[in-house]
Image (cartoon, rainbow, N blue to C red):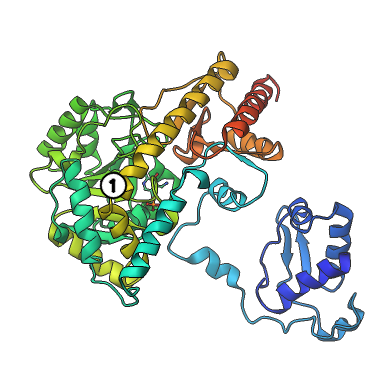
């Protein structure tokens, strides 16, 4: 077993897949990956270390050796059948490059989450996408079957703004929410996330500041920060972004734009009421401040439809509006859109053409039929009923296990409950202990760096049975960490 592992690791090193200086996963992670106990991994690593292929660094874990041992040492290979083992010393190290690119890496916890979401057996208490059984697999199969009977698949690039068919379908969807946007004002993107990237690099000068809710989803990705854009976070209450101080802060920071998620905010689940929306439009109107409205969760209302989006109140072309099919229908389809004045969407389309020549033509075709054929509307109705049930079940569990430990909101839509712990806890430690106990968490510090008392709970991923198990377990871990001296 240890020989198989050392051979596997040597292949990685000798092929250059693991370049000099690359850090190896911690031993316990390797044990998990290979499904072996610690002593087997230690023996395998010992062999590589004896060959000078890896080296331990104090406080820096184990890394692939920078200067690798001479080839004649291959004679002492643990597997005499292999003569290819030792690589030629590498001219340079990728490490410096990996650390130099202009785009910031994800936060360590986000990197952990992105990896651990594919680990079997973890209960995912914060995941921001519907569980596979809530996604419309059979309806989408019907759409694809229908399309394959009617048309040849589109295999070419689409127009810079995206396929005309999909833009018309999106235009009709938007009209249902009071947004008048003809297809020339719509740019199809690879998800709303790409919309954010395009706006960050295409519309905002380096060094400019945007205002946003704090906490916010935007803090958990680095699209804007990597483009040199600074954040000024504003407080929220139960009605959404607070208005006091907004104008003052906009002037002080010379804000270039305001980003908001008015409907079912990520991570707090808060719905901005109609009055607040009106006020926000008025105050920003007086300041001449453009708004980026993220409508990712807008159609996912559970009780009653939300007030009209900010874009529906916009008579000056001051609001850019983002939408996506990811939240209700399919995150893997990678279809989203930006609505805005024509010169703005054309500018963003030009950058998109330089980035990826457009979203997948096949995805765009499927999305157009999905919307036009009424499948989306029908799916939403089923989904709302199922999410309502799940939300209520989680609220019930919270009542039973978190009373006296935390407070929470009752979301009227979207995916999330923002759990406010009565006492602070070290969130990174909580994340790690929860992982050991089989729970995957989205901690509040992802959405507000300084936070130490919130968790984003999602009712759309873990199954009802998993939630029954996971939430009391979580309550126990939090209690333990809050004990004095821990
Ligand atoms: N905006 C918000 C508020 C989100 O929560 C997400 C997904 N987490 C996105 C944008 C991006 O989603 P996608 O790119 O899949 O459309």
**Which residue shows up at 50% across the image and 56% down it?**
105
Q: Nearer the viewer, residue 159 or 453?
A: 159
Spot occupied by residue 70 in the image (x, y as percentages of width and height) = 81, 83
Q: Nearer the viewer, residue 57 or 141?
A: 141
Spot occupied by residue 96 in the image (x, y as percentages of width and height) = 56, 68
Quarter of the figure that contains the N terminus: bottom right
SS type, badge 1: strand
Spot occupied by residue 7 in the image (x, y as percentages of width and height) = 81, 73
Q: Is residue 409 above or below residue 326?
A: above
Judged left or right of residue 191, residue 432 is: right
Tally the marks: 1
Q: Nearer the viewer, residue 102 or 172?
A: 172
Q: Which residue is mark 1?
A: 209
Spot occupied by residue 380 in the image (x, y as percentages of width and height) = 35, 41
**Which residue shows up at 38% across the image and 54% down it?**
223
Q: Quadrant of residue 263?
A: top left
- Residue 27: tell me if it is visible: yes
Residue at the extreme left of the image, as rendered? 315
């Amino acid at each position: 077993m240890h020989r198989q592992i050392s051979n596997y690791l040597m292949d990685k090193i000798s092929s250059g897949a693991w370049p000099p200086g690359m850090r190896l996963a911690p031993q316990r992670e390797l044990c998990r990956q290979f499904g072996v106990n610690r002593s087997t991994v230690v023996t395998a690593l010992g062999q590589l270390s004896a060959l000078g292929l890896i080296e331990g660094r104090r406080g820096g874990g184990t890394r692939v050796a920078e200067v690798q041992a001479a080839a004649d040492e291959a004679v002492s290979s643990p597997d005499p059948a292999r003569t290819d083992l030792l690589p030629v010393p590498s001219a340079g190290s990728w490490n410096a490059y990996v650390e130099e690119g202009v785009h910031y890496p994800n936060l360590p916890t986000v990197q952990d989450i992105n990896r651990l979401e594919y680990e079997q057996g973890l209960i995912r208490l914060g995941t921001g996408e519907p569980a596979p059984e809530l996604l419309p697999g059979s309806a989408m199969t019907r759409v694809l079957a229908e399309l394959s009977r009617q048309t040849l698949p589109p295999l070419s690039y689409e127009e810079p703004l995206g396929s005309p068919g999909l833009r018309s379908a999106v235009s009709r969807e938007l009209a249902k929410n009071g947004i008048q946007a003809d297809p020339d004002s719509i740019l199809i993107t690879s998800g709303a996330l790409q919309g954010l990237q395009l706006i960050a690099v295409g519309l905002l000068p380096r060094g400019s500041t945007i205002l946003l809710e704090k906490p916010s989803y935007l803090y958990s990705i680095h699209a804007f920060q990597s483009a040199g854009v600074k954040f000024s976070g504003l407080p929220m209450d139960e009605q959404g972004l607070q208005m006091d101080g907004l104008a003052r802060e906009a002037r002080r920071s010379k804000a270039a734009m305001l980003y908001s998620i008015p409907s079912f905010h990520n991570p707090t689940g808060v719905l901005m009421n109609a009055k607040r929306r009106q006020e926000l439009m008025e105050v920003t109107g007086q300041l001449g401040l453009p708004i980026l409205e993220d409508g990712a969760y807008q159609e996912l209302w559970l009780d009653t439809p939300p007030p009209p989006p900010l874009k529906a109140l916009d008579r000056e072309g001051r609001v850019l509006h983002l939408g996506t099919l990811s939240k209700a229908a399919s995150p893997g389809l990678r279809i989203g859109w930006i609505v805005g004045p024509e010169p703005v969407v054309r500018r963003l389309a030009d950058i998109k053409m330089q980035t990826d020549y457009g979203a997948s033509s096949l995805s765009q075709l499927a999305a157009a039929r999905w919307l036009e054929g009424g499948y989306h509307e029908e799916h939403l109705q089923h989904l709302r009923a199922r999410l309502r049930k799940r939300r209520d079940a989680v609220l019930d569990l919270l009542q039973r296990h978190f009373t006296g430990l935390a407070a929470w909101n009752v979301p009227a839509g979207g995916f999330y409950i923002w759990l406010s712990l009565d006492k602070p806890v070290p969130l990174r430690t909580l994340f790690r202990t929860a992982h050991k106990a089989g729970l995957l968490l989205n901690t509040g510090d992802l959405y507000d760096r300084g936070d130490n008392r919130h968790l984003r709970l999602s009712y759309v991923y873990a199954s009802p049975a998993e939630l029954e198990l996971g939430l009391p377990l979580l309550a126990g871990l939090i209690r333990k960490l809050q004990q004095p001296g821990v």
